[in-house]
Image (spheres, rainbow, N blue to C red):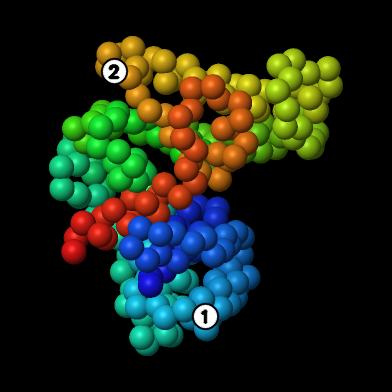
């Protein structure tokens, strides 16, 4: 049994893994260092009290949170720790200008999609602090991607930058047009991002002359999967599947 940790900008996800089976344990918000450290250590202690763990693997886009995790794991002498940093994998062909700048989360999303099928082309949308789009073909060529401000990032920036709008709750529904500021903001949040994803998928498919399976993952996948007609698969464990795919193929 091993622990896999996805260290995101805003949230750290901890799962248990054996072979290809994933058991979700905990999601920890990264707010303040002391609270985060306390919560993470409590989570690890709880896991170790109930399970025999040999290895801990991390994938991280948050340097500060990763430092905290490393320091805590070091306190448990029987645990072997490895941060998965390489962007290289057999048959994965990518011509990114500076490969070290290619987000490790994006890399494992690509591997996760590959683990699901070697017979499909994929467009992967990871909707979180940022929305990333990554495209691979069935030969495991990386065709390119996009990085877009995440829906909540854009929403928060709008609220903070416009004094007249004020603070409002998001109303999650399918209504296209609003009749109040709150309704208009909510509709803009849902509709603009949903239509953007639909439109990007159609444009990518047309540009490459290929049909694609569309996967949505990330913290906001549950919300947007309800409104985007073109999605074939919602998979919030995609990064973990990519990590497992690499670990198992290294054996």
Q: Relative to residue 176, is residue 194 drawn left or right?
A: left
Q: Which residue: 52% across, 83% down?
A: 49
Numbered badge on residue 50: 1
- The number of discs equals 2
Numbered badge on residue 210: 2
Measure how far apart labels 1 and 2 are at the Cα level. Answer: 47 Å
Q: Earlier in the sequence, mark 1 or mark 2?
A: 1
Residue 142 visible in the displayed image: no
Image quarter of residue 81: bottom left
Question: In the rendered image of this protein, does residue 240 appear above or below residue 200?
Answer: below
Question: In the rendered image of this protein, does residue 120 appear above or below residue 16?
Answer: above
Image quarter of residue 40: bottom right
Image quadrant occupied by the C terminus? bottom left
Task: Tell me residue 53's x, y (percent).
Answer: 40, 78
Task: Tell me residue 112's x, y (percent).
Answer: 34, 46
Q: From the viewer's side, name the closer residue of 150 and 207.
A: 207
Q: From the viewer's side, name the closer residue of 147 and 173.
A: 173
Task: Characterize the local packing of mark 2: few (<14), some (14-19) or many (20 or more) Cα atoms within 10 angstroms.
Answer: few
Dot 1 falls on a residue whose secondary structure is: helix
Dot 2 falls on a residue whose secondary structure is: loop
* Residue farthest right in this picture: 180
């Amino acid at each position: 049994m091993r622990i896999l940790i996805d260290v995101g900008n805003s949230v750290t996800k901890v799962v248990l893994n054996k072979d290809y089976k994933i058991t979700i344990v905990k999601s920890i918000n990264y707010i303040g260092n002391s609270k985060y450290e306390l919560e993470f250590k409590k989570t690890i202690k709880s896991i170790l009290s109930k399970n025999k763990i040999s290895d801990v693997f991390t994938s991280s886009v948050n340097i500060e949170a990763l430092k905290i995790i490393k320091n805590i794991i070091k306190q448990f002498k029987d645990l072997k720790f490895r941060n998965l940093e390489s962007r290289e994998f057999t048959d994965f062909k990518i011509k990114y200008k500076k490969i070290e700048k290619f987000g490790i989360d994006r890399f494992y999303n690509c591997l996760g999609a590959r683990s699901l099928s070697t017979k499909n082309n994929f467009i992967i949308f990871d909707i979180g602090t940022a929305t990333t789009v990554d495209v691979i073909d069935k030969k495991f060529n990386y065709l390119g991607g996009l990085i877009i401000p995440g829906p909540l990032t854009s929403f928060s920036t709008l609220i903070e930058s416009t004094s007249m709008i004020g603070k409002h709750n998001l109303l999650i529904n399918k209504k296209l047009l609003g009749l109040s500021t709150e309704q208009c903001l909510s509709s803009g949040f849902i509709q603009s991002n949903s239509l953007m994803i639909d439109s990007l998928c159609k444009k990518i498919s047309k540009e490459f002359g290929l049909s694609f399976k569309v996967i949505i993952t990330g913290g906001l996948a549950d919300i947007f999967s309800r409104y985007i007609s073109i999605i074939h698969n919602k998979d919030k464990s995609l990064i973990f599947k990519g990590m497992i795919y690499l670990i198992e193929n290294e054996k």
